């Protein structure tokens, strides 16, 4: 498995986009989204997507340079139409706009439709954390991508419907919750397939409702379905997924999950909370630090080295990969080489 620095991966991706005459500013945003995902260990949202971006560009599904249209707005909200441009470009603009509005109105929200896949939501939430704001983000698959079974069902009816929240801490890495409401993101199944490895029990069920560990079953016809997260309490993951679908689909105008034939993209909902509107940021940070210390003081279970806060493993992995390089599986690297 070859290793690369973040700078090497960035250069490779930018060169591929340059060959296709993608606007440099857009290429940089899309590349940063992918490489940053790899840096923190979210390989399912990293450069494994480069081949997919190129395939969708060739098919005319992604419109480079598409205008991000404001359908309507007020001082505290905006509704955007991405006109099927690059998802990372649209998501970045949505968060930046939410930050701008929250500076004036304390809390703001931005709803987005007709966006192609945005990638890792946590990376965008961190943009708000950098501005000393709390960001809450969620996305559905614009009505398509129905690969997750509802609780009690054996066929896909929901997308993985991720949710992310970033909480700033003065002088420290933010707390970052970044999770799918399914037991696993679909991209992690693709990673397992590329590595020719079985998926764990509890990720997938076949059309008879039986557990399967064969990643290829997810791409067969009819496909295996991903389960909602929660195990014996999967009804909770299912319920949260329904709410994400409503906020990302019904409220934005993108549409809730409806059909395997619906075009896959992202409906996106962004909420930004300006911490300084509620209390001074240093005092907020002190309370978060006290809270973290209290949680970490709990007696650990056997074999547990440390209690980790949400997102902490990613920051640890980033520092490790900065020293040792970013591993890219052989199948993904072969696909990238074919694009060079």
Image (spheres, rainbow, N blue to C red):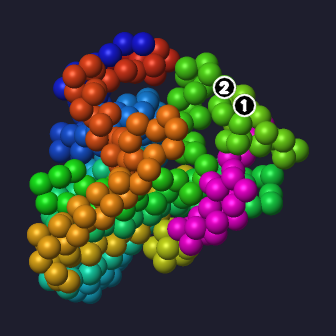
Mark found first going from the N terminus, 1 or 2: 2
168 sits to left or right of 297: left
Q: Mark 1 Cα within 10 Å, few/some/many (few <14, many 20+)? A: some
- In terms of depth relative to the viewer, which is nearer, 18 or 181? 181
Measuring from the top left, give residue 219's x and y in whole percent.
69, 34
Secondary-structure class at tag 1: loop
Who's the residue at 59% across and 64% down the image? Answer: 241
Q: Quadrant of residue 115?
A: bottom left
Who's the residue at 20% across and 83% down the image? Answer: 278
For residue 195, above or below residue 40? above
The quadrant of the image that shows the C terminus is: top left
Is residue 27 at least partly visible in the picture? yes
Please say whether residue 237 is one of the residues in the magenta stretch: yes
Q: Which residue is mark 1?
A: 213
- In terms of depth relative to the viewer, which is nearer, 183 or 306? 306
Measuring from the top left, give residue 13's x and y in whole percent.
28, 28
Who's the residue at 84% across and 41% down the image? Answer: 210
Please say whether residue 311 is one of the residues in the magenta stretch: no
The magenta stretch spans which residues? 221-245
Who's the residue at 53% across and 68% down the image? Answer: 244
Q: Which residue is mark 2?
A: 198
Q: Quadrant of residue 201?
A: top right
For residue 19, above or below residue 74? above
Distance (Cα) linking label 1 and label 2: 5 Å
Please report contact status of discs 1 and 2: CB closer than 8 Å, yes or no.
yes
The quadrant of the image that shows the N terminus is: top left
For residue 297, above or below residue 254? above
Is residue 70 at least partly visible in the picture? no
């Amino acid at each position: 498995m070859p290793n690369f620095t973040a700078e090497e991966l960035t250069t490779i991706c930018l060169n591929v986009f340059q060959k296709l005459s993608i606007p440099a500013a857009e290429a940089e945003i899309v590349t940063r989204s992918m490489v940053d995902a790899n840096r923190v260990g979210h390989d399912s949202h990293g450069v494994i997507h480069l081949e997919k971006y190129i395939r969708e560009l060739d098919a005319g599904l992604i419109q480079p340079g598409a205008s991000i249209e404001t359908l309507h707005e007020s001082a505290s909200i905006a509704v955007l139409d991405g006109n099927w441009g690059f998802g990372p470009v649209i998501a970045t603009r949505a968060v930046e706009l939410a930050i701008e509005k929250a500076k004036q109105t304390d809390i703001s929200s931005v709803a987005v439709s007709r966006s192609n896949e945005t990638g890792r939501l946590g990376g965008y939430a961190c943009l708000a954390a950098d501005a000393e704001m709390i960001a809450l983000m969620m996305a559905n698959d614009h009505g398509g991508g129905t690969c997750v079974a509802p609780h009690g069902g054996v066929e896909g009816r929901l997308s993985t419907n991720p949710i992310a929240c970033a909480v700033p801490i003065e002088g420290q890495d933010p707390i970052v919750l970044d999770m799918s409401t399914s037991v696993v993101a679909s991209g992690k199944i693709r990673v397992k397939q590329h590595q020719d490895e079985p998926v764990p029990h509890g990720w997938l069920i076949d059309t008879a409702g039986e557990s399967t560990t064969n990643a290829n079953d997810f791409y067969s016809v009819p496909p295996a379905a991903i389960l909602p997260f929660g195990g014996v309490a999967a009804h909770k993951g299912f319920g949260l997924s329904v709410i994400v679908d409503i906020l990302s689909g019904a409220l934005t105008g993108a549409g809730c999950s409806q059909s395997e034939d619906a075009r896959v993209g992202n409906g996106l909902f962004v909420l930004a909370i300006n911490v300084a509107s509620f209390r001074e940021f240093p005092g907020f940070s002190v309370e978060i630090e006290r809270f973290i210390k209290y949680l970490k003081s709990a007696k650990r279970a056997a074999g547990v080295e440390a209690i980790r806060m949400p997102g902490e493993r990613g920051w640890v992995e980033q520092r490790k990969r900065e020293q040792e390089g970013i591993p890219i599986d052989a199948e993904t690297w072969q696909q990238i080489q074919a694009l060079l």
